[in-house]
Image: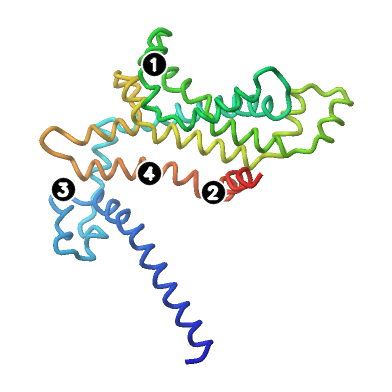
Amino acid sequence: MSTRSIAVAKGILLHLLYIFVGLLVVGPLLWALASSLRPRDEIFKFLMPFSLKALYPTTPTLEAYRVIFFEKDFGRAVLNTGLVAVATVVGGLLVAALAGFAFARLDFPGKRALFVLTVVTFLVPFEAIAIPLYDLIQQLGWVDTYAGLIVPGVANGIAIFLFRQAFAEIPNDLVDAARLDGASWLGILFHIFLPLTKPVIVGAALLLFLFQWESFLWPLIAVRDERYKVVQVALSDFQLQYQTLWEQLFAASIVAAIIPLLLLLPFQRHYVRSVVGTGLK
């Protein structure tokens, strides 16, 4: 067999492997989407034995989506989560940019120790700080409020780390020239540093948004009022004591997954650049 034939055979095998891995990833998602469009008694009908009909609905219906939005008030949970996530992104970017700039460019006592503590914060499991954090927001009167959901997520150690690493790579000549022209530190941050680090802004924004959108434990602890329920907590409502409302659970899961996906796909290039670039630096 010639070298060319061997290379072609390897290419075909490699592509078959890619297709197989892709089916392993996409298959369960297609089944979940199809299940959200089926009556409940058909969801597991084509799994044992497996049939390709499991991947598409034979009698599609939007009844599950109608129920979750018009009877189970899942739309309110989506709006609550969106509000919390967007507010966290706005506040988190401001805090992370200011903190990252201070760590990268300003000299003050204890800077190194504070930066080490900042890095440690995203290495500590959230479960370790959940109880003292709840005690703090209870003393502030933030239980069952949007503030209790938003404020603890604003100061994010990973976002601060990303900004600090990006700002540290900007040449000192730009800073010195701006200072000679009379620019303030805030002016340098907003007019020079931030425009030069747009991929980091996008990456940090996506991290903050996904952190809040996927959050379950903290909203479960901090909120008991149904008016402030978020998506991940609302998903548990479809698992009753003696049964699971599968078609409604799948419908709600599809809605919960597609919103961050619509944000991540257009900006994934910037996200990858921010994380990889920061890692290299």
Q: Residues within 10 Å of mark 2 (few under 14, many from 20)?
A: some
Q: Which residue is mark 3?
A: 40
Is the residue under label 4 in contact with that under label 1 (CB below 8 Å)? no
- For the residue pair 218 and 149, the one nearer the viewer reads as 218
Q: Residue at x 79, y 21 (%)?
A: 184
Q: Earlier in the sequence, mark 4 or mark 2?
A: 4
Which of the 4 image quarters holds residue 129?
top left
Secondary element under disc 2, as helix, strand or loop, is helix
Instruction: Kindly tell me whether residue 228 is visible in this rendering.
Output: yes
> Marks 3 and 1, Cα distance to the nearest angstrom?
42 Å
Q: Which residue is mark 4?
A: 257
> Marks 3 and 2, Cα distance to the nearest angstrom?
36 Å
Amino acid type, mark 2: Gln
Q: Residues within 10 Å of mark 1 (few under 14, many from 20)?
A: few
- For the residue pair 37 and 268, the one nearer the viewer reads as 268
Question: Image check: 160 left or right of 36?
Answer: right
> Marks 1 and 4, Cα distance to the nearest angstrom?
31 Å
Instruction: Kindly tell me whether residue 76 is visible in this rendering.
Output: no
Above or below for 112 versus 199: above
Q: Nearer the viewer, mark 1 or mark 4?
A: 1
Q: Which residue is mark 1?
A: 132
Q: Residue furthest bottom?
A: 1
Secondary element under disc 1, as helix, strand or loop, is helix
Residue 1 % position (x, y): 47, 92
